[in-house]
Image (tube, rainbow, N blue to C red):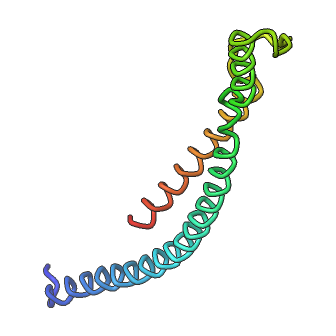
Amino acid sequence: MQSPHPSQSQGDGKDTKSRFWATYTREATDHDGEFLEKYQSDMDIVLIFAGLFSAVNTSFIINMQSNLNPDPFYTTNVLLGMLLQTANSSFVPPINQPYAPWQGPGTLVIWIQSLTYASLCASLLAALGAVLGKQW
């Protein structure tokens, strides 16, 4: 036997499904909105921190660049002394400072420079991730 109102029983099923999907859409939209609002503010904080940290870190890197080069005053003084001594050795006393070629920066300076560059790269990578997250 067939039910007397087949269209009505199918309509109840469609109404139940449409109510379910309407409720699901509303709840998912609310949840996604809260999620995005929370993480948008978190990404703003990461961007501000990464920007400030990168600025401070860059100022330290600029300040430490002079440690990677030889002292120009020492080299100039030694070369001027050698020049004066060869030009007129009777008036200038002999210099006890031999000219030694620069051996490069110390190991500690290289380690510190490497760590500051690594932290700058990590900070800029975090800022890039936050920007990409905000645009997504």
* Residue at x 69% of width, y 48% of height: 60
On the rendered structure, is 42 left or right of 83?
left
On the rendered structure, is 20 left or right of 104?
left
* Residue at x 56% of width, y 44% of height: 121
x then y, percent, for residue 76 = 69, 26
x then y, percent, for residue 23 = 40, 83
Viewer-proximal residue, 39 or 118? 118
On the rendered structure, is 123 left or right of 101?
left
* Residue at x 46% of width, y 74% of height: 32
x then y, percent, for residue 90 = 81, 10
Viewer-proximal residue, 40 or 94? 94
Question: Which corner quadrant holds the C terminus?
Answer: bottom left
> How many numbered discs sit on the rendered protein?
0
The image quarter in which residue 42 lies = bottom right
Viewer-proximal residue, 76 or 64? 76
* Residue at x 26% of width, y 81% of height: 13
The image quarter in which residue 10 lies = bottom left
Q: Is residue 123 shown above or below 31?
A: above
The image quarter in which residue 9 lies = bottom left
Question: Which corner quadrant holds the N terminus?
Answer: bottom left
Viewer-proximal residue, 135 or 30? 135
Q: Is residue 40 shown above or below 127?
A: below
x then y, percent, for residue 64 = 70, 40
Q: Is residue 71 shown above or below 103?
A: below
